[in-house]
Image (cartoon, grey):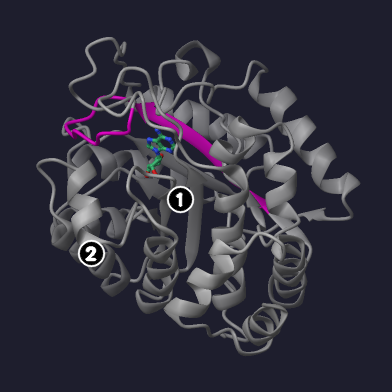
């Protein structure tokens, strides 16, 4: 196993059997995390980039079996911020020092290409990078968002196994999800994708395939989180994902894609109070603090326990404290994917 970790660290290539073997072993986890930490330092440095996340609508047309925002969850209290509210939230975040604003929502058709483009143009005026995370759209919409100034797009594949994908996404197609990722690449976005760890019937081989999928699609960013069961979903009684397994998938992703951006995800922190710190020491170089107004934040309940009790500013200070205390720095630029050393 140590030979495999050495091979991953030096060649950035492993096959599906090798990845599966590492995911199945547990005695080598600390060696794996240390290797991912060295590769992170060598290729993307010590800076941790902060992204201000605005959750602007929880209205969603999808049926994702694991997600608390699924349209069939009648207990979810729905909200949609106005265009002015979104722009005002972004302005405050930019003033507070965020150089990237992430605009995330459920798949809410009210935000037509035209309305979304107007929001993007106004947020771009604050001299920030704009990342969108609004789900599957036709090519023409992605093109309109790009023309309005959007820089990056997040759309997790969730799982790269077609059968598993379709078992948890009724009324959706795996092919269309992949089509979206390819369209975004074609249009010149920096593309972020990623997966859930611990879905029902998901195996370590599925996860190994996900990592190879990230490489194949030439992702610029990868977000990985443990699946956390939500009581108002059909999968409420499932076991859910394990923090260490999620960090392992993330560490292996760092080893195979050394120059990409990788967030320490909120779902990791939800499972353990040191979850994000562990991720930052195992390959991650991005954190996405929530800057949404606290009055609606509780309603964006993708999974339970997601909302931190503290306010945006306190969360930011606390996060920065944790980063600096670990000998890391805060990124001062846009923090896009670095172009050199592409591995
Ligand atoms: N647990 C963890 N992550 C979830 N997501 C959705 N539902 C859950 C859940 N129950 C993730 C999906 C989606 C992202 C915005 O949130 O991966 O892409």
Instruction: Dividing the image into four quarters, tell me where ligand 1 lies.
Output: top left
Q: Position of residue 57 (x, y in %)?
A: 33, 26
Q: Position of residue 20 (x, y in %)?
A: 48, 70
In the picture, measured across the screen, residue 301 lies left or right of residue 294, that is: left
What mark, if any, has residue 190 been given in the picture? none
Q: Is residue 216 above or below residue 223?
A: below
Is residue 52 inside the magenta stretch?
yes
In the picture, measured across the screen, residue 110 lies left or right of residue 26, that is: left
Q: Secondary structure at mark 2?
A: helix
Task: Say which label, 2 or 1, has the lower sequence index.
Answer: 1
The answer to whether the residue labelled 2 contacts the one labelled 1, judged by CB atoms less than 8 Å apart, is no
What mark, if any, has residue 178 been given in the picture? 2
Q: Secondary structure at mark 1?
A: strand
Q: Which residue is mark 1?
A: 130
Q: Is residue 216 above or below residue 184?
A: below
Q: Which residues are magenta?
A: 49-67
Pointer 2: residues within 10 angstroms few (<14), some, or many (20+)?
some
């Amino acid at each position: 196993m140590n030979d495999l970790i050495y091979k991953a660290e030096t060649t950035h290539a492993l096959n599906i059997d090798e990845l599966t073997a590492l995911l199945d072993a547990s005695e080598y986890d600390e060696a794996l995390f240390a290797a991912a930490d060295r590769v992170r330092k060598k290729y993307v440095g010590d800076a941790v980039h902060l992204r201000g996340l605005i959750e602007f609508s929880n209205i969603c047309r999808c049926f994702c079996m694991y997600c608390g925002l699924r349209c069939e969850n009648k207990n979810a209290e729905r909200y949609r911020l106005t265009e002015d509210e979104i722009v005002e939230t972004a302005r405050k975040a930019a003033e507070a020092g965020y150089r990237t604003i992430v605009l995330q929502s459920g798949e809410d058709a009210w935000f037509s290409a035209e309305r979304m483009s107007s929001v993007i143009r106004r947020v771009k005026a604050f001299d920030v990078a704009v990342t969108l995370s609004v789900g599957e759209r036709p090519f023409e919409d992605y093109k309109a968002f790009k023309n309005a100034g959007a820089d990056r797009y997040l759309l997790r594949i969730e799982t790269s196994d077609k059968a598993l994908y379709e078992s948890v996404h009724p009324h959706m197609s795996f092919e269309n999800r992949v089509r979206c990722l390819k369209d975004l690449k074609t249009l010149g976005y920096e593309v972020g994708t990623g997966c859930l760890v611990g879905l029902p019937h998901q195996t370590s081989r599925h996860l190994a395939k996900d990592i190879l999928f990230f490489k194949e699609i030439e992702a610029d960013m990868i977000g990985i989180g443990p699946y956390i069961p939500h009581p108002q979903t059909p999968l409420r009684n499932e076991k859910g994902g394990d923090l260490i397994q999620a960090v392992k998938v993330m560490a292996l992703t760092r080893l195979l894609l050394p120059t990409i951006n990788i967030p320490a995800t909120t779902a990791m922190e939800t499972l353990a109070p040191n979850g994000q710190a562990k991720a930052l020491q195992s390959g991650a170089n991005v954190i996405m603090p929530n800057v949404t107004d606290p009055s609606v934040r509780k309603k964006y309940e993708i999974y339970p326990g997601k909302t931190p009790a503290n306010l945006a500013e306190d969360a930011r200070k606390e996060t920065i404290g944790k980063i600096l205390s670990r000998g890391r720095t805060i990124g001062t630029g846009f923090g896009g994917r670095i172009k050199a050393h592409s591995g």
